Amino acid sequence: MNNTEKRQLKALAAKARLGAIIGTFNAKSGHPGGSLSAADIMTYLYFKEMNVDPANPKMADRDRFVLSKGHCCPSLYAVLAMKGFFDWEELTRLRHVGAMLQGHPDMKGTPGIDMSTGSLGQGVSTACGMALAAKYDNKDYRVYTILGDGECEEGQVWESAMFAAHNKLDNLTVIVDQNGLQIDGPVCEVCGIEPLDKKFESFGFHVIKINGHCFDEIEAAFEEAKTIKGQPTAILAKTVKGKGVSFMENQVDWHGKGPNKDEYEKACAELQATIAELEVEC
């Protein structure tokens, strides 16, 4: 990936963060912190990695994406809007009665959503089923799912891990957004999950550890995952909760609340400045 491509992806990720802020402000609720931390990875998936077609969202051979930490859908919605699945204006109606975009992903009402999620741990199970279906049908599509690090406290995650390894789902890539915070505080204090790499390895995964905000490392990880045969891959991505908005970064309070008008304006100003700088460089 050359420098121009990286700047373009960074600009798109900043726009995804802006979209998440727009959505949660207009909803007066939602989950901006984890939406911002996962924005780089979701941007890379939809603009570089995955085979998807906004004109044909149910294309049979498309790659699948499941946001297992479904509460962080505001940035996913922004990415889908930028990709062309629906209008950007829909973000202003996030969580509104009768609107398209619900507080958690809805596969029946939102183009581009492959699975309705929200109950933590269930999304990764569904991703395993999708990957197994591809094997049964002799299809080449790949399946990607993003988990939160707090979500890894769910037992269902590890049942899924056993299932994925047992069935040699090498077409499955699990990405853990390790921002270190969950709704009740630091993950290490609520219910520590480390050593997470050793846990996934013991369950039969190939493990890759990266900086989840570095596009060079993100690209290398996904390219490596495609070379692994006979076992699923787990990408453990170290991230910053609230990334891109200075007063939200590493602040657990931003796990589950929307910004007020003053906070909204400050966040938008920061992100718009970042976008403008990156677009000038491009």
Image (cartoon, rainbow, N blue to C red):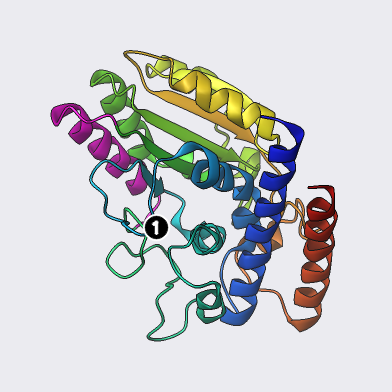
Q: Nearer the viewer, residue 105 or 191?
A: 105
Where disc 1 sits, the SS reads: loop
Q: Nearer the viewer, residue 121 or 52?
A: 52
- Looking at the image, which residue is at 77% across and 70% down? 268
Q: Nearer the viewer, residue 68 or 55?
A: 55
Check disc 1 and report the residue beneath it. Answer: 54
Is 134 one of the magenta-colored residues? yes
Is 252 one of the magenta-colored residues? no
Q: Quadrant of residue 97?
A: bottom left
In x, y percent, where is residue 123?
Answer: 35, 47
Q: Quadrant of residue 172?
A: top left
In x, y percent, where is residue 101?
Answer: 43, 73
Q: Quadrant of residue 136?
A: top left
Q: Nearer the viewer, residue 166 or 102?
A: 102
- Looking at the image, which residue is at 70% across and 62% down? 253
Quadrant, the N terminus: top right
Q: Residue furthest bottom?
A: 97
Neighbour tally class for label 1: few under 14, some 14-19, many 20 plus, Cα within 10 Å: some
What secondary structure is the magenta-colored segment mainly?
helix
- Looking at the image, which residue is at 74% across and 43% down? 7
Q: As shown in the figure, which amino acid type bears the numbered disc 1?
A: Pro
Where does the magenta region start and end?
117-140
- Looking at the image, which residue is at 71% across and 31% down? 2
In x, y percent, where is residue 238?
Answer: 66, 35
Visible residue check, residue 38: yes
